[in-house]
Image (tube, coloured by chain):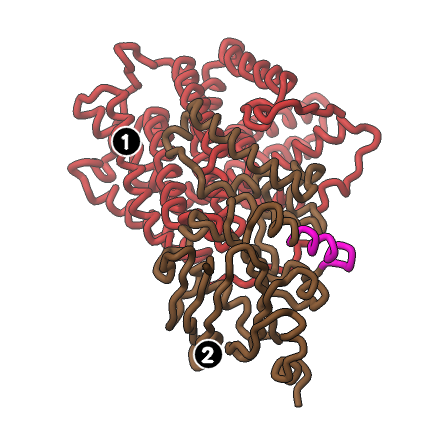
Chain colours: A red, B brown
């Protein structure tokens, strides 16, 4: 067990708790910088997805995990960012300008969608964002002069200040850079009055208001910031996917983002990254299993002469390649996480850390919440 | 001169007149208590004062300024802080974060300086932290600083709410049943703290309370309320002896 001896208020403001923390994050930074040199091109490409999903996760975490406003329309913001970025690049704007414009447009859309959020709470707000995303998807398919509808829109590799990020390796570093920037900015907001106001709105609107928080302004800021970050992710997403079509930005993608923050652990930036690792790496993992399970079992069957095992392997492979299995596995994991680990992967991570730091004195009850006391009903 | 006054304050919920023409004023530096049976309209008066409810009639004046039309989030900046009957803390935040949020009305940063966490933001955060530490020292909450509110016992939460209200640097403190749910010892502590808040910090206190021992110990003046109407105002002893008050509580 490591105890932190605090000697200055600044220690509670710093990004890293102490030198030990800074060391581990530094090690992690070195690891992610070196990783692509050791990996196959394919895996580098898949890991870039983790970073893009990580940015999406931070976006939704601010809104759902910190401000307590649940959105089912974030795929639309991603789409707006992606299409805007692709459109401006196609019209010859420099990459940076296109990205800034894409973020600005998505932020503005977030503000507009956020306005009804000031009047709606809970499930009603969620339904409103869902309606918004359906409308936006329709616009993507009909506004052909900009989006090229279902014919699709090709997005070239990013060229920034004359440097082309053509290879998977260079794009990996580009995505990593933006993820770190977004994490840093969000962490800054969370340790200043704006972040505290978000948390206050999540936990008790009436008390937040009585302490001087303007609910309308801070909910709007949360929506706009979340949308802007999503727009940034959208710009990277456009390059990554290389070909934009309206049916990418469906409600299923929004649900996947929600799954990301819940599985990762609501109310923590770590959770956004953990969730991104999970959401981005599960499909390739299923693909690998789909190929390797039948092969290895067939090899095992031929070497031992037990033919039934080979047919079991073929059956598993056939099952995993059925359409919808991936979505089914996502759903199953979501249900299991909510039942068994409501604090998500980050909660589990904290438990494992505590287990080793207090070994052999770990008590499972450390994390059991006491009952919450009665709250007054919401006024108004 | 009175710090706060309510004139002919009224609010109707449908056909029910929850507060019906209440007039009172709170002098600077006193502890003024509102008592009354359940449903008399005590908490409703607090909600009218923190502007969560819109009064259907009457006027609120604070420090010579009409606050009847002020939006709820401006009340804290004017110098009115409150606690809630059923504890409205930010449960999934630490005690420290709860108290720092109370400094919101005094923040001087904007979104972009916070996004970059400029040195000015850091300096401001340090100032807020110092203000918060004063409240922590005042109410002996040091050991709970980094605990999440969900893990704290009820009594500590009650004190935390008081601390949070003090962190806004109020001139008028509204306490909604500060002793509800506390044991005898904790209630005694609360009585001392209310006296200290009045004498040492010079904050005027307006309180709703049922525990008559606490009321008699700390109040300068008491107003009794029944069915949204004031029935007696005076020193604690006077009000307790008032036949109308006895009838309101015991019937007959």
The answer to whether marks 2 and 1 mark residues whose Cβ atoms lie closer than 8 Å is no
- Reading the image, the residue beneath label 1 is A102
Which SS class for mark 1?
Answer: helix
Inspect the magenta stretch and tell me whether residue A37 lies in it.
Answer: no
| Tally of marks | 2
Left/right placement of residue A82 relative to residue A34 reads left
Seen at 55% across and 79% down, the residue is: B231
- Magenta stretch bounds: B182-194
Chain of residue at mark 2: B
- Reading the image, the residue beneath label 2 is B17
Q: Position of residue B241 (x, y in %)?
A: 67, 79
Q: Position of residue B198 (x, y in %)?
A: 60, 52
Q: Residues within 10 Å of mark 2 (few under 14, many from 20)?
A: some
Q: Is residue A239 visible?
A: yes
Q: Position of residue A101 (x, y in %)?
A: 25, 29
> Relative to B3, is A165 above or below?
above
Which SS class for mark 2?
Answer: strand
Instruction: Residue at the far right: name it.
Output: A360
């Amino acid at each position: 067990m490591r105890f932190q001896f605090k000697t200055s208020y600044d220690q509670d403001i710093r990004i890293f708790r102490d030198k030990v923390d800074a060391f581990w994050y530094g090690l992690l930074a070195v690891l992610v910088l070196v990783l692509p040199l050791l990996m196959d091109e394919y895996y580098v490409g898949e890991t870039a997805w983790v970073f893009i999903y990580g940015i999406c996760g931070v976006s939704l975490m601010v809104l759902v995990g910190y401000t307590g406003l649940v959105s089912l329309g974030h795929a639309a913001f991603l789409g707006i960012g992606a299409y805007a970025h692709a459109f401006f690049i196609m019209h010859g704007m420099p990459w940076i300008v296109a990205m800034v414009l894409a973020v600005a447009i998505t932020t503005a859309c977030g503000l507009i969608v956020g306005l009804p959020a000031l009047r709606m709470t809970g499930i009603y707000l969620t339904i409103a964002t869902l309606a918004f995303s359906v409308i936006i998807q329709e616009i993507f398919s009909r506004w052909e002069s900009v989006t090229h509808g279902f014919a699709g829109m090709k997005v070239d590799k990013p060229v920034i200040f004359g440097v082309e990020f053509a290879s998977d390796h260079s794009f990996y570093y580009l995505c990593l850079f933006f993820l770190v920037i977004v994490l840093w900015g969000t962490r800054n907001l969370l340790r200043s009055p704006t972040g505290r106001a978000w948390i206050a709105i999540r936990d008790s609107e009436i008390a937040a208001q009585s302490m001087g928080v303007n609910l309308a302004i801070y909910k709007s800021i949360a929506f706009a910031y979340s949308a802007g970050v999503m727009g940034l992710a959208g710009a990277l997403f456009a390059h990554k996917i290389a070909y934009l079509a309206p049916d990418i930005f469906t409600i299923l993608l929004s649900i996947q983002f929600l799954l990301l923050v819940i599985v990762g652990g609501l109310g923590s930036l770590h959770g956004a990254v953990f969730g991104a690792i999970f959401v981005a790496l599960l499909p390739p993992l299923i693909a690998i299993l789909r190929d390797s399970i039948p092969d290895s079992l067939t090899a095992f069957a031929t070497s031992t002469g037990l033919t039934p095992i080979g047919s079991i392997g073929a059956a598993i492979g056939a099952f995993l390649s059925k359409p919808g299995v991936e979505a089914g596995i996502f759903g199953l994991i979501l249900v299991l996480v909510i039942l068994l680990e409501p604090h998500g992967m980050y909660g589990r991570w904290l438990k494992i850390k505590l287990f080793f730091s207090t070994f052999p004195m770990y008590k499972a009850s450390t994390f059991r919440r006491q009952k919450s006391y009665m709250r007054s009903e919401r006024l108004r | 001169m009175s710090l706060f006054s309510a004139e002919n304050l009224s609010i109707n919920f449908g056909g029910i007149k929850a507060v019906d023409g209440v007039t009172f004023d709170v002098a600077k530096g006193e502890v003024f208590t509102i008592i009354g049976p359940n449903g008399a309209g005590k908490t409703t008066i607090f909600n009218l004062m923190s502007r969560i409810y819109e009064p259907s009639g009457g006027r609120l004046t604070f420090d010579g300024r009409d606050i009847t039309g002020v939006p709820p989030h401006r009340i804290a900046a004017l110098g009115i802080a409150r606690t809630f009957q059923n504890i409205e803390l930010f449960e999934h935040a630490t005690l420290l974060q709860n108290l720092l949020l109370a400094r919101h009305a005094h923040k001087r940063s904007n979104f972009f300086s916070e996004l970059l966490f400029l040195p000015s933001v850091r300096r401001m955060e340090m100032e807020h932290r110092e203000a918060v530490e004063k409240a922590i020292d005042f109410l002996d909450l040091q050991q709970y600083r980094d605990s999440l509110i969900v893990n704290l016992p009820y009594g500590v939460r009650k004190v935390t709410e008081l601390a949070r209200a003090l962190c806004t640097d109020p001139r008028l403190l509204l306490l909604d049943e500060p002793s509800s749910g506390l044991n005898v010892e904790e209630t005694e502590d609360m009585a001392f703290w209310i006296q200290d808040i009045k004498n040492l910090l010079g904050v005027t206190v307006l309180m709703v309370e049922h525990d008559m021992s606490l009321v008699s110990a700390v109040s300068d003046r008491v107003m009794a309320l029944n069915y949204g109407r004031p029935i007696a105002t005076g020193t604690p002893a006077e009000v307790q002896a008032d036949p109308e008050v006895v009838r309101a509580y015991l019937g007959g």
